[in-house]
Structure formats: structure tokens, C-alpha cells
Image (cartoon, helix red, strand yellow):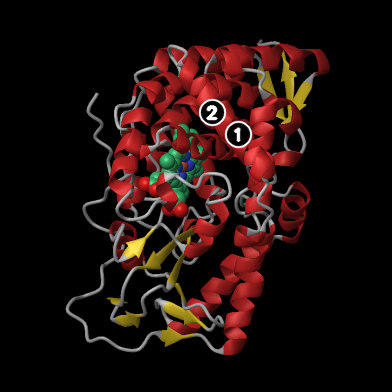
Amino acid sequence: MAPSIPQSAPPSTPPSTPRSAPQRTHRLVTASPADTVRVLALAVAPIVAQGVIARRRRVVGLAGKLDTDGRGVRELQRLRARYGTGPIRLRVPLRPVALVLDPGDVRTVLTGTPGPYTPRNREKRGALGRFQPHGVLVSRDEQRPARRRAVEELLDGGHPVHRFGDAFTRVAREETTALLAAARGTGEFGWDEFVPAWWRIVRRIVLGDAARDDHTLTDDLTVLRHAANWSGLGRRHRRRSARLRAGLEHYAAAAEPGSLAALVAAYPDEAADPVGQIPHWLFAFDAGAAVTLRALALLVAHPGDTDLRAAALTAAVLESARLWPTTPLVLRDTTRRTTLGGGELRAHTAMLIPAWFHHRDDEVRADADRFDPQQWLDGTARADWTLMPFSAGPAACPGRELVLLVARTVLETLLTGADVSAGAGVPDSGAPLPRGLDPFALTFRVRPPE
Ligand code: HEM
């Protein structure tokens, strides 16, 4: 199948007026040392502390209680009021860093991949290199085209339904039905019950039914991801890395029909290291668990709006990913000296696109803190470069459609298979939605369908 990956959010025009060109270049607007410290402490550090690669459960809970994501939004609004939309240089020692607040600049950076803005950012490399050294996202420029082509072709990126869609939805339904059956016994379920079911779905889809209960493999990955939270400073866990790779090779060799492993086994371009792409898929599916459970919270909190058609459920999942993005900071590095918004950027500048801020900026967005699935149905969100839950441009997420398919199937199975209602942690539909929503604390009540 010839994949036709879109640029994920492929707007022909950005939402806000692009900067008028041509502009004279000038030195980058630079935050004062005090403002740099405030931004790092109030906006960036709380995100890093929650775990960028593997969420730290306790810290996520604490961050929600302290509303650190809300404080971060307010801090960046204050910065913008003081310095304009930038890009704004932060005075970080030994590392040029620029914050991208202007919608037109977001578009320029995301479309300028792999150069002058490479997704292979230094910090990301340090972190992801721990468990997916050959993943496309951290691949060198000369390796990137083949690996990008491989992931697009294997994941059917850009196609609403993967070629194995029937098999994948069957697996998602089976495991979710089993989850519901157990939950009917206790009358409720939460993260601790949901996540094992989610991983069974993921292992079966990615590696095949034989991997359904292979917790060792995904537990190894989790350990490596926690080490990756420390970027280049984390422990290497060489034995676990080798065991993970051997496990993936084993499932690829088995090539169970109807799994992604079968496609990996048959992929003709070995230089793209198709097996080496799998750790990213497993890692990224983990984000899907939090996004799906939060989408369920949105749906049960807004029962009047619940529409179980595929498009509506997909929109709810996208809203969940907008309201609580699992990649809150999209990172790029400049590959060479360049200009953005008229400001001069040095080579190897880290570009910080604060996705969670753009998604929740209540000085710009009327729907910042409310459930607004309509925008994903009528195309407005797609035309908005400041909405980037799956990133955008040539390095946009090629697994977007696949994870949306799985998520909406899980939601549909839950909502048709039982009467699911709000338990602990589900936000009140009447109030503005919290800027942080702890997925580990969500619970849902379950009764047989009426
Ligand atoms: C809700 C779940 C997911 C979300 C929110 C998500 C979001 C994203 C984002 C924001 C990026 C860009 C990262 C960056 O630029 O640093 C990305 C890249 C990527 N995602 Fe996803 N993703 C999800 C699930 C998946 C799944 C399930 C797969 C594979 C099965 C996948 C495969 C990839 C790959 C391979 C890339 C790298 C693309 C490249 O470098 O060209 N993602 N994703």
C-alpha cells in the first residue's frame, strides 16, 4: 500500500496572521536572567520532573494538585506580555535555547524538518538513545529518509484504518471486553486495571498473540524508559537492552500473521532497521493509554454529548490529547545558523515549542479549558498549527491513525458494553477543565448496560 502521510495537521494557512515578510534580522529577544530562572522553574522543570519518557506516578499526582501546568501557562503568558512572541532566548548556560510562542514560528519550525530544525534534538537523543538508538526520531539526517519511509509504510501512516484494522479492532474489543467482565465483578476500574488490558492489546497488535502475556519484554522497556528520563545521565542497563532487542528479533522472526511484526519481517529495506523501530512504537502506545483513559473521563463527564460514532470518538481522543498533551514540549535543534521571526538563531540552538501552553492558552483560545471535540470534526483544529498533540510537518506522528483506531475501539467497547460513569478524579463538566489530569487517579463505576 502506498502510504500518503499527511503533514498530520496540514493547514494551507496558519491560524494567525503569519509574520509579514521580508523582515530585517535582529538579535534574538533575550529574557533577563531572572525571567529565565522563572520560566525554567515554573514552566519547564515541572514537566521534566513528571518524567518526559516515562511518567513518574507520584510526581504526576503532585503536579496535578499544585496545578503546575496551569502555573506554567500563566508564566509563559507573562513572558509574552513582557517580551512579545519572540522567539525568546533563554539565558541557559552552555546551551542556546529559544522559546517558540508565535503561531507562524511554530509552523516554520515544524515544517523546517529535518533542516534547519532537526527533530534529533540533543536532549531527546540522550534520552531516546537509551532504548531506541535506531528509532527514526533520533536518526541522523542521512538515515532519516529510509527509516521514515519504513515507519510510514509499516504503520500505514496517513491512512484512517491500517490494512490490519479488522484484526486490530478485534483484539482491542476482546481485551476490553475481558476488562469489563472483571470490572463488573468489582463495580469499578481504574488505571491499575486498565493498563494491563491496554498492554495486552498493544503486545498482540505489535508483536502477535504469542506476546500477549510477555510482561518481561514490556517491563524491560519500562525500566529503560525510566532511565531515559535522566537523558544521557541515566543508567545504561546493557543486559536489559540486549534482552529487549533479542525479544523483538524473536517476535519479528515468528512474523505472526495480522501483527505489525509480520510486516516488519517482510520489510525489504534492512538498512532502515525495521526491528529497531519497534521500541518507539511500544513506548508511544503507552501514551495512548493515558490519552484513552482521559478521553473516557471527558466522555463520561459530558454524557449529553456522547456520540459513539467513530468520528466523534476520535474527536474525543484528540481533545484528550490536546487538553493533556503527552508530548508537552516539542523539541527541535537548529542544524545551522538561521533566522526566525527576524531573530538570529545560532547553530545547535534548542527550540522549545510549548505544546501544552499553546493548547491551553486562554488569552488566545476560547476553548482553552473546555471539551471542544467539534473543532476536530469541522476541520478547524486541523488548520491550526498551534494544536500539535501529534506534532505536525514532516516528522509528525506516523502512528496517529493507528493509535486513534485502537483508542476509539476501546472506548466504543467500554461505552456500549456497560453503563460506565464517573468515579474518582473525573473532572466536573460544569467547571473549567483542570490543566493537569492525573490518569493514575481516575476511576470509573461500571454497571451492566441498561
Ligand atoms: C496517543 C498516542 C500518541 C501521541 C500523542 C503521539 C505523539 C507524537 C508526537 C508529538 C511526535 C513528535 C515527537 C517529536 O517531534 O519529538 C510523535 C512522533 C512519532 N510517533 Fe507518535 N504518538 C502517539 C502514538 C504513536 C504510536 C502508537 C506509534 C507507533 C505505533 C507512534 C509512532 C511515532 C513515530 C515513529 C514518531 C517519530 C516520527 C519521526 O521522527 O519522523 N506514535 N508522536
Element type where label 1 sits in the image:
helix
**What amino acid type is highlighted by mark number 1?**
Leu
- Where is residue 226 drawn, in percent x and y? 68, 48
Residue at 75% across, 54% down: 59
Element type where label 2 sits in the image:
helix
- Disc number at residue 244? 1
Say which of 153 and 237 sits in front. Answer: 237
Residue 298 in view of the camera: no
Side (left or right) of 242 relative to 318: right
Residue at 51% across, 77% down: 95
Residue 55 in the image: above or below residue 206: below
- Where is residue 284 drawn, in percent x and y? 52, 39
Residue at 31% across, 61% down: 107
Disc 2 to disc 1, how far (Cα)?
6 Å
How packed mark 1 is, by other alpha carbons closer than 10 Å (few <14, some 14-19, many 20 or more), is many
Q: Quadrant of residue 302?
A: top right
Q: Are marks 2 and 1 in contact (CB under 8 Å)?
A: yes
Q: Quadrant of ligand 1?
A: top left
Side (left or right) of 446 relative to 318: right
Side (left or right) of 166 relative to 449: left
Residue at 48% across, 34% down: 278
Q: Which residue is mark 2?
A: 248
**What amino acid type is highlighted by mark number 2?**
Leu
Say which of 164 and 73 sits in front. Answer: 164
Give the total of numbered labels: 2
- The N terminus lies in which quarter of the figure? top left
Residue 208 in the image: above or below residue 392: above
Say which of 255 and 76 sits in front. Answer: 255
- Where is residue 335 drawn, in percent x and y? 34, 68
- Where is residue 211 drawn, in percent x and y? 60, 18
Residue 423 in view of the camera: yes
